[in-house]
Image (cartoon, helix red, strand yellow):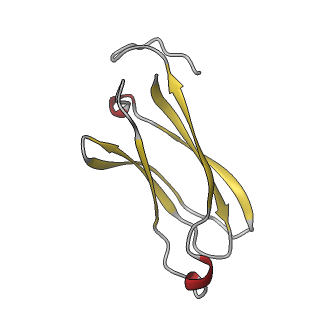
Amino acid sequence: HRPKNIRVYALNGLANDDYCVFLEVRGHDVRIGCYDETSPTEEWLPTDFEVPRRLAAWGQDVKIKVMATGNAWAHFNTWGQLAIDRIEVWGRQGGCGDDNSSDD
């Protein structure tokens, strides 16, 4: 199966919780999307990112990287910048070039 969607559960808290999601492809990080905080609400929010078909390496391990992009806040040393609860990945079936995909 090849990755189709990535869902990141991150805390939208008091700090600037903006972040970007990358996939490592052939040793290079490729950005697939970013989250831009609209207002601090102190809640866990799921955010979905679609993996472009050209990046879905069939039969290979997928490395996901999440990078905080907001400025460090006053309590960074105590609490950190970005809190991630979990990351979920959904796949698509079929081989490379298969346009008839279905969710797993």
Q: At x 55% / y 73%, what residue is drawn?
A: 81
Comparing 36 with 94, the one in front is: 94
Give how far across and how far down residue 92 sits, in percent. Answer: 50, 22
Q: Check the image and report above or below for 94 versus 23.
A: above
Comparing 70 with 8, the one in front is: 8
Label total for image: 0
Q: Check the image and report above or below for 33 versus 52.
A: below
Q: Quadrant of the C terminus?
A: top right
Comparing 36 with 23, the one in front is: 23
Q: At x 25% / y 46%, what residue is drawn?
A: 27
Give how far across and how far down residue 22 sits, in percent. Answer: 40, 50
Give how far across and how far down residue 76 sits, in percent. Answer: 56, 82
Quadrant of the image occupied by residue 40: bottom right
Q: Check the image and report above or below for 46 versus 55.
A: below
Q: At x 62% / y 50%, what residue is drawn?
A: 86
Q: Check the image and report above or below for 92 versus 28.
A: above
| Outermost residue toward the bottom in this view | 74
Looking at the image, residue 59 sits to the left or right of residue 46; the answer is left
Give how far across and how far down residue 48 sits, in percent. Answer: 58, 43
